[in-house]
Image: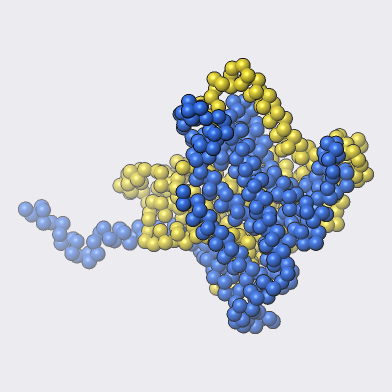
Chain colours: A blue, B yellow
Amino acid sequence: MAVMTAPAPVKAEAGVSPKSRRKIRDNLTGHAFLIGAILCFALFMWYPMIRGLVMSFQHTRRGVTTWVGWDNYVRIVNDPSFWVAWKNTFYFTALALIVGFAVPFFVAILLNEFRHAKGYLRVLVYLPVMLPPASALFLFKYYAYDPSEAGLFNAILTSLHLPTSEWMQSTTMTMPAMVIASTWMNMGGAVLIYLASLQNIPGDLYEAAELDGAGIWKRIWHVTIPQTRLILALLAMMQIVATMQLFIEPLILANGAGTQDSATSVAYLIYQHGFFQNDLNGAAALGVIMLVVLAAFSAVYLRLSTKD
Amino acid sequence: MTRTLISHAQLRRGRGRVIYWTLLTVVVVGFTLVFLGPLYWMVTGALKSGQEIAQTPPTLFPQDPQPQNYVDAWTQLDLAKLLFNTFYYAAGAVLFQLVFDTAAAYALSKLRPAFGNVILGAMLATLMIPAMVLIVPQYQTVIDLPVLDISLIDSPFAIWLPMVANAFNIFLLKRFFDSIPEEIMAAAFVDGATPLRTLWSIILPMSRPILGVVSIFAVTAVWKDFLWPLLVMPHPETRTISVGIYAFAAGTPQNVVVAASVIAALPTVVIFLIFQRNIMSGLTAGSLKG
């Protein structure tokens, strides 16, 4: 009997049970481990998020900051380059979705079928990802998109007896040319991710489809695509967000705005306002607009992709 | 090997075999041209003279190689300094990310302090914010840090600290730590190990693959980043390689710029080719599976 009642006084004496004391200690160590990351997030993510929103409603001149309501937004939207930039950005995103999204998927399907040279082909596709983007873009700018017939692309077109193009100097080819360069530079990552998910598809699904008489295209349509749907949806979303931020391609390939604003993008406009026109508030407002557009886009997209 | 779209048997027999080998040859040749071709063009193009590069039709080999372009690029653009800077920033970024992000992921996964899920949620929410949206207020923060009132311009911390705020890596690490059985942790605590000791001696040795992936991501992120270093490292002495080439391009002959681009690309390409087996398997295993 005495043995059973013995532990009780200890508990009462401490005031806090050992269990909850351990809990507090665990909490303290837990938060101690988190503190470095939390500080960095607070300083470089959470605080700038709020600050950007606040800045977009303010105006700063000679160190004096005043609240100006929607003024910055009105000014930004009334700027003619605002609409050109959005038109270009959407055009780029649409092209990049058609080319930059479909091509890596089919490349991955193709590579997954091969039993030979697989490693070599994977390395090849990933190689451009390892280049600094400035390196890759100068290569395209100076050598591939040279508007004379000495340019690589024009030389190929000439040898095939096709009409040449002025590429970056033409207003119509700027965007397609940027999509080609950007796809070449970036597709390796997507191909690797698709390859990993293609390898997870159970082989008997193809077996069954084949027994049912499904040809190659039907097997892709009814087995491959549904089985990789989640990854496809995720990468499509990431692709949209990434391409909407089109910046370095116009800056390096088209010297910024391109011929007659054919390369101006929303991101480039943010950079212009923020760091050249000394209009930080306008740049902040543009950032908020970009965020709202992307959020709306994602909401619609999520709705559509979860419906069926 | 499990079967894929087309069965093995079909590929090994008669017509299937012919198609397979034809297609494989076409793809190997085509991919080599598309992905290696431009690199060849870049390396040899930088050896050509200004006249030769403007010649139609273009020459396949440099007729009169001018290695001087590479020498000019190396000296005029001070590439040694730029390369050193980039390596220094990349190494620091790996270190800072590994220390702070693994600690945070470990806390969120194993120690589970109060409000842990709220904090994780607030971190993950930043993934939805495109980098371009925050560029102006982030820059404002860096030129005048709140409370401390110091500027990080031209300081490597302007690259290292924001790299820690990487929700994707914390999420990757947390998911990996989640898969380490709870019993191992409990056993360590019963033996009297502190949380730090458990992290160091038990969790980290088990997590080598994911730590490798995070390190690769950190290095490539610094190597490929452009706008942020352009803004926060304005001084020629502190520039990264990408920004340096861009800044010099305006007043430099094309061939010299391309020669500089080749030199800039070499370190990562060589590292990649040496470690490609590990990098590839690490990336595919660590990337969005399941």
Q: Is residue A219 above or below residue B200?
A: above
The residue lying toward the viewer, choosing from B243 and A108, is A108
Residue at 47% of width from left, 62% of height from top?
B122
Residue A99 coordinates in the image, percent (x, y): 66, 45
Q: From the viewer's perspective, tell me whether residue A186 is left or right of residue A304.
A: right
Q: How many marks?
A: 0
Residue B212: image quadrant is top right
Q: In the figure, residue A241 lies in which quadrant?
A: bottom right
- Toward the viewer: B241 or B50? B50
In the visual, does A101 lie left or right of B190?
right
Q: Is residue A297 above or below residue B205?
A: below
Residue B248 visible in the displayed image: no
Q: Considering depth in this image, is B151 or A185 the residue closer to the camera? A: A185
- On the question of residue A75 being in view, the answer is yes
Residue drawn at 35 percent across, 45 percent down: B182
Instruction: Determine the residue located farthest toward the front in the rendered image.
Output: A213
Residue lying furthest left in this view? A1
In-front residue for pair B22/B215: B22
Question: Splitting the image into 4 quarters, where does residue A267 fall?
Answer: bottom right
Residue B87 point in image, percent of width and height? 67, 49
Q: Residue furthest right?
A: B51
Question: Percent x, y for residue B194?
Answer: 37, 51
Instruction: Name above or below for residue B149 compared with residue A199.
Output: below
At 48% from the left edge and 25% from the top edge, which residue is drawn? A211
Q: Position of residue A49 (x, y in %)?
A: 55, 67
Q: Residue at x 61, y 16 (%)?
A: B14
